[in-house]
Amino acid sequence: MAELVYQTWERITGRPWSDARKSGFTTGSYADNIALQKRLLGGWRPYAPKAAPRPAPKPAPKPAPKPAAPSPGPVPVAPGLSAQQWEAALSLQRETARELARLQEQAQADVRRQSEAQLGANPADFVAYELYRRQLEEEGFTPERASRSDVDIQNLFNVALGLEGSAQLPEGMVDPSTATLGKGQFGVNLPTTGSISRSELQSYSPTDLGVLESFLRGGVETGGGFQGINPEDFFT
């Protein structure tokens, strides 16, 4: 299973995940978190001491003036090449450039399909999977499966966790099972630990637990974005 963003942060920096947001390295959004993880895996160390500035290099001596280039002839033909050979060489270059562009597009499409398949195969990446498919559509690409609407995702989440509704209570009483941490990704109401009994939690399938963990990591909506929740803190 791929390493999560907060795991990469804590392993490399030795600091708690909350420091990443406090220090301004991420807003807590999925895109910022992924960008931060890529920078860390690429060798960036946010708390490494800054190196001493290098002394300014001495100015290089001015080069001697070059002799004026001869004016080109009316037809840019290299020595020993006929006009037909020159045109054939240009045509080959254009064809090679088109083929390289096609191969690059194909490689990028393969990467998109692989990323989508990997995210879709793991319930714990449910939120990342849906966000990735929406991102592909916004960029003009067609994902293997169309992204779900917010309403469809909310219904799926509620059905998976058995949060469709509860019995009517007397006026003035509050059902603890309906308490929420706030709005999560896609407008989902994230339940509190007190709103899910231990027996209900034990009855969840690994897929249901993975989906719940995915939404917890996706975070609760705040004024500045989404604040992620460590699933280990939620289940303890």
Image (tube, rainbow, N blue to C red):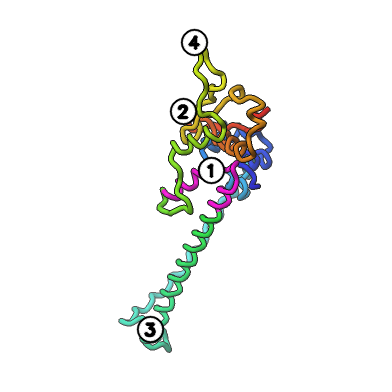
Q: What residue do we see at 49% from left, 29% from top?
A: 183
Task: Give me the C-alpha separation between circle 1 and circle 4.
Answer: 39 Å
Label disc, if present, on residue 223 of the rendered structure: 2
Q: Indicate whether residue 84 is drawn in magenta.
A: no
Percent across and percent down for residue 228 are: 56, 33
Q: Kindly identify the amino acid type of the residue bearing the numbered disc 1.
A: Ala
Name the residue furthest top: 172
Q: Which residue is mark 3?
A: 77
Q: Kindly identify the amino acid type of the residue bearing the numbered disc 2.
A: Gly
Return the disc, 3 or 4, that comes first in the chain's sequence: 3
Task: Give me the C-alpha separation between circle 3 and circle 4.
Answer: 92 Å
Are the two marked residues, 2 and 1, in contact with CB atoms closer than 8 angstroms? no
Query: SS at mark 3?
Result: loop
Structural crowding at the residue carrying mark 1, measured as other residues with C-alpha within 10 Å and reported as few (<14), some (14–19) or many (≥20): many
Return the disc, 2 or 1, that comes first in the chain's sequence: 1
Say which of marks 3 and 4 sits in front: 4
Say which of marks 2 and 3 sits in front: 2
Q: Main secondary structure of the magenta part?
A: helix
Q: Is residue 169 above or below residue 95?
A: above
The magenta span reads 115-137
Residue closest to the eye, 224 or 47: 224
85 left or right, relative to 28? left
Structural crowding at the residue carrying mark 4, measured as other residues with C-alpha within 10 Å and reported as few (<14), some (14–19) or many (≥20): few
Return the disc, 2 or 4, that comes first in the chain's sequence: 4
Residue closest to the eye, 208 or 226: 208
Q: Kindly identify the amino acid type of the residue bearing the numbered disc 3.
A: Val
Asked whether residue 234 is in view, the answer is no
Quadrant for residue 73, please give it.
bottom left
Return the disc, 1 or 4, that comes first in the chain's sequence: 1
